Image (cartoon, helix red, strand yellow):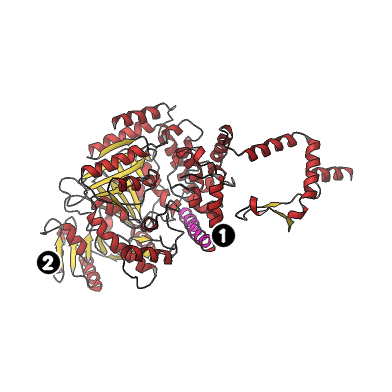
Amino acid sequence: MSEARQEILRGLRQGKGGGPHAGSWQSPRTFPDLVSRFVEALEASHGETFVEDDAGAAVSRLERVLVELGARRIVCQDEPPLDSLDLPERLPAFEWHVVGQTTGSLRAICAEADVGVSSAQAALSETGTVVVDSGPGRSRLVTLLPPVHVVLLPADRLVADLFALVEQQEQPLPANVTLISGPSKTADIEQTLAIGVHGPRRLVVIVYS
Amino acid sequence: MTASTGEFRREAAVAVADAHLQAALETATGRFRTAREIVLAELPDADRLRDHLKAVRAATIANLAGYLEQFEQNATAAGAHVHWARDAAEASAIVTRLARERGVTLAAKSKSMATEEIHLNDALLAAGVTPVETDLGEWILQLAGEPPYHIIAPAIHKTRDQVAALFVQETGAPLPDDNIPTLTATARRELRQRFLDAGMGISGGNIAVAETGSIVLVTNEGNGRMVTSLPPVHVAVIGIEKVAPTWNDAAAWLALLARSATGQPLSIYTTVITGPARAGDPDGPEEVHVILLDNGRSRLLDTVYEEVLQCIRCGACLNICPVYREAGGHAYASPYSGPIGAVITPLLFGVENYPALPHASTLCGACQDVCPVRIDLPRMLLELRAEEVRHGLASTTESLLEKGAAFVLAHERLLRLGRGALALGQKPLVRNGQIRLPAALNPARERDLPSFAPRSFHQLWEELQDE
């Protein structure tokens, strides 16, 4: 199909060309309190949030959330800071499956898990968004297939908006970067909001300092 | 598909006469309009950001070849395969060849107007591959055998009862009731298995970022993530105009896309795909293929229509358009309806096949006002109308009327005489000061004309001068 490539590019080059690139947009977005804006924005799109003082309180909150959900089987990313929180040891009441440390098909485990637990590589206050990357120990399916996705988010990963994110994003990019701004939803039938079409029905973000 | 004047009018008349459909259209477009206004008002400098994005889009389109090559180079370096398709047949042939070579029999698709445009599903079926649409609205339409009604909300015209009937027919299982959460849960269950079984995931692409060779995909349901994460092969079909040179440009695009489309600050999921799964990734596709689709786009460069390539496909112009809101999406007989569809459909698929569309507008200008990149659609609708006249596509009646009008307007006495005659002759047709045209000329009953005043301005002016 290189013939098609040549022809399309030749056609495009016959144009008169244009001026220079328009330059970068300097976003004026700032928030006096990144955490409170994040909470407000995520809850507006039906996400659930908790704000905790430290990692210990965040783990206790995670336990209460899992108990309240009646969760049993948990699938969890193997990534910092989760790997240093010793979740399976501290919350032994649940059946933990840590990415890369389980036997059997990760896909089947994610499809049958009650909850997927991850951290987030960054988060956007403006839109209440968590950013999850793919990579070693970071499964795409942990944050997608279980009916509930719980995120443990260190507060210092919050930035104002998308422009701030792309500014700090290192390249090359991971194969998959996903920005998540709420639980899966649709309004495709009679414009009526329905939560939980294909992705998780609930998104719980525990922000901690 | 085509839209002759008669076909457009017939379809529009059906929509106008359908009270349910009119209510559904008004609810859906009304919600989008209100939400859009609210989120844009919350964004500081929204108007400046729109100007900036327009400048970015204009400069990108003018230098498209270079940015596409940069995209190709970076995507290839990340391990993706980049293909080029001059037209619909070439694009479909690439997808079916990939499917055949890999023994794929089931393909899961996320919503993509580019694949609608190339009729990919028909090509897949002919090649023995079953395509399953996984966007809830698109799945409903696939079961119903209908094209999308709106580029963002494809099934806005379907009632919950109609959806329930389609689902019962598909699953063979009775539904406990027809409430929307039950219907949504049914779709989740049915389609989850298809995602897991599919040998290929097919998506469109909202943006191709040249700087990193990435494809950006936005969805609210999460099906875009499913089709790009679960199947071993992911194929994205994307129009050549949807390139953003840098990530800062892509951020500006994303900051306006969902806000203009559904009135969300961002869609629920924004997925950025840069090649297939890397070594060490626990999951993800083994292969990623990107098909860059021309299909009539490159020939618009350096024409009076070049600006239309700046479109980011948000659908805001559909929601504001007084014609779309009454006539509905199917009258346009194209995946692209509303004002943007009335311009790009004839441009991509032939003015001669869609002669009605440039006239499906009151030229009120609302589409240009709401367009995030302020595309002058009214100007292009007029250009297309002129093109129809140049190509002899205007109807004989219209040509004769226009020629007659031109003659009368050029001869003042004739004009005065004619006006006087019409002011008298209109009398049997006037109701409440409006001329009600006979049904043959006014099938949708949508058009009353103001009646001629008893005396012309000219006459009144002369009387005033006398006083």
Counting from the top left corner in percent of width and height, residue B173 is at 31, 68
Q: Which residue is mark 2?
A: A89
Counting from the top left corner in percent of width and height, residue B291 is at 31, 40
Compared across the picture, whether B135 is left or right of B361 comes to: left
* Alpha-carbon span between mark 2 and mark 1: 66 Å
* Secondary structure type for disc 1: helix
Compared across the picture, whether B159 is left or right of B226 comes to: right
The segment highlighted magenta reads: B21-42
Counting from the top left corner in percent of width and height, residue B256 is at 43, 49
* Secondary structure type for disc 2: helix
The chain containing the residue under callout 2 comes to A
How many neighbours does mark 2 have within 10 angstroms: few (below 14), some (14-19), or many (20 or more)? few
Q: Which residue is mark 1?
A: B17
Q: Amino acid at mark 2?
A: Glu
Q: Is residue A191 above or below residue B127?
A: below
Q: Amino acid at mark 1?
A: Ala
How many neighbours does mark 1 have within 10 angstroms: few (below 14), some (14-19), or many (20 or more)? some
**Of A207 and B350, the residue lying toward us:** B350
Compared across the picture, whether B131 is left or right of A76 comes to: right
**Of A76 and A61, the residue lying toward us:** A76
Q: Quadrant of residue A55?
A: bottom left
Q: Which residue sits at x=57%, y=32%?
A: B390
Discs 2, 1 touching: Cβ within 8 Å: no
Counting from the top left corner in percent of width and height, residue B354 is at 51, 42
**Residue A203 visible in the snapshot:** no
Task: Name the main secondary structure of what is drawn in magenta.
Answer: helix
- Let me know if residue B29 is in the magenta part: yes
Asked if badges 2 and 1 are on one and the same chain, I answer: no
Q: Is residue B14 above or below residue A17?
A: below
Q: Quadrant of residue A190?
A: bottom left
**Of A125 and B439, the residue lying toward us:** B439
